[in-house]
Amino acid sequence: MQDKNHPYGKPEISDQLLKEADKCVKCGLCLPHCPTYLKLTDEADSPRGRISLIQALVKKDLNPGKNLRLHLDRCLGCRACEKSCPSGVEFGKLLDGARKWVRKTIIKHSVQPRPWLLEQLSDRTRLKKIIRLLPLIRCRPFLAAGKKFFPAYHKKLLKIVEILPDRIVEPGLFPAHRPSGKSLQIFIGCAASIADQPAIDAATQLLTKLGYAVEIPRNLVCCGALHRHNGYPERADQFCATNQKWLKNSRAEALLTLATACHLELIEQQVSRNPVLTITDFLLDIFRSTSTPEFAPSSARVAVHTPCSSLKDKTLQLLTVIPNLEVFELPQNALCCGAAGSYLVNQPELAETFGEEKLALLRATKPNILVTTNTGCALQFRIQIEAANLHVEVLHPVELINRQLKHKAFRT
Ligand code: SF4
Ligand code: SF4
């Protein structure tokens, strides 16, 4: 409940924010690691500047005008600053808290933006309806008019719609090709069940071929990350509670994730007592502990992009199972690609400039394939690559592994 006697709502929200922000000693060691500071060279767009801003806003030392909030909105939430902070400021949590605080205490006095898009994206029933509208949205006259007259935010949405797969992944049970009694669940999330549809299909095919029964659970919902990072933690907590309820009695060996942003949220919210593993980690483990299946050689040159949300990306190691494949880390992987959850649409111009930097690296390193383990990053790369007319295929590593697996040459 809102505390009407407190100028900025519940006192404990402000107290928590100040407690975390006050850990910052203003040393500036984080500045060279912050993509928005490097790009805009404005202290207010640096981690240190944003922390000062949060402190001033919460203490009422500054008027919370739109311009001040813009500096918070421009933050990617990539958490690159956390890794270099000697004081252990948990900037990601601070930013989430500040966005919640801004929503509850400032925006409510002006126009309260309904999280309409977040609600559409986080509900598979609504997404199914959107899928049916895709042919209409993609018709040439509509696209041409949209590209000409829409504001930047809607133009970016159109670009995403143009490259989305036409199908949403349906929940279900997929028996193992040669039953081994082992079973796994795959978490498909919400928007990722469309955007990552080819990767989820590849994961299901691969795992069933490797002897696992696969369940894509019907009752699991969105992980809540988009809501949490946009100032709606209460809604994110509802999703989390639903997922915890349905996972409580799971008998599967593990819940596998494909998208690192969902994975991070599921881990941080401790959604399940059973193991929650990235498919990369899971495959590496089974390839190490059992006989590795045989893979057809490939002469492709593969660049690996590491998403900011990846805890410890092992894609490079995983792909070494494919003979002859030339795999390398895309340079400057520590810098965000600009997708950053809903940043892609909320800050379209800035997101594009970050994407263009990645394009320059692709041009310089000339891979045939770019692999990434996060849904938003894959969308960002696909949009940028298509616009630049580059010939680089964007894949999830599991698609590449499944593509190269020799069908009759593996053992479990
Ligand atoms: S989260 Fe990323 S963009 Fe935001 S302040 Fe930290 S490094 Fe900069
Ligand atoms: S590195 Fe940490 S303590 Fe230093 S300015 Fe950045 S956030 Fe503050």
Image (tube, helix red, strand yellow):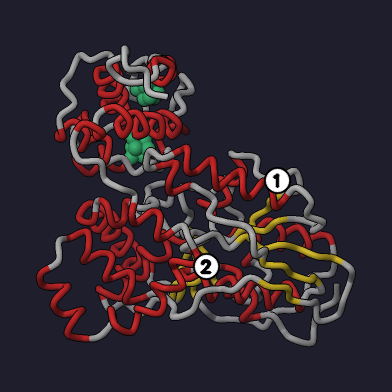
Q: Amino acid at mark 2?
A: Ser
Asked if the residue at label 1 sits under 8 Å from ligand 1, the reply is no
Residue name at image x 63 percent, y 70 percent = 171
Residue 399 falls left or right of residue 114: right
Number of numbered discs present? 2
The crowding category of the residue bearing disc 2, from other C-alpha atoms within 10 Å (few below 14, some 14 to 19, many at least 20), is many
**Cα distance, mark 1 to mark 2?**
20 Å
Q: Quadrant of residue 75?
A: top left
Residue 33 visible somewhere in the drawing: no
Q: Position of residue 149 (x, y in %)?
A: 10, 69
| 289, above or below 83, in the image | below
| 43, above or below 173, in the image | above
Residue 368 falls left or right of residue 238: left
Q: Quadrant of residue 105?
A: top left
Residue name at image x 89 percent, y 68 percent = 181
Residue 301 falls left or right of residue 351: right
Which label's residue is closer to the chain start, 1 or 2?
2
Q: Amino acid at mark 1?
A: Ser
Closest to the observer: 363 or 157? 157
Dot 2: element: helix
**In what quadrant of the picture does the N terminus appear?**
top left
Ligand 1 rendered quadrant: top left
Residue 346 visible somewhere in the drawing: yes
Q: Position of residue 279 (x, y in %)?
A: 65, 61
Closest to the observer: 198 or 85? 198
The crowding category of the residue bearing disc 1, from other C-alpha atoms within 10 Å (few below 14, some 14 to 19, many at least 20), is many
Residue labelled with disc 2: 193
Residue labelled with disc 1: 272
| 317, above or below 332, in the image | below
Dot 1: element: loop
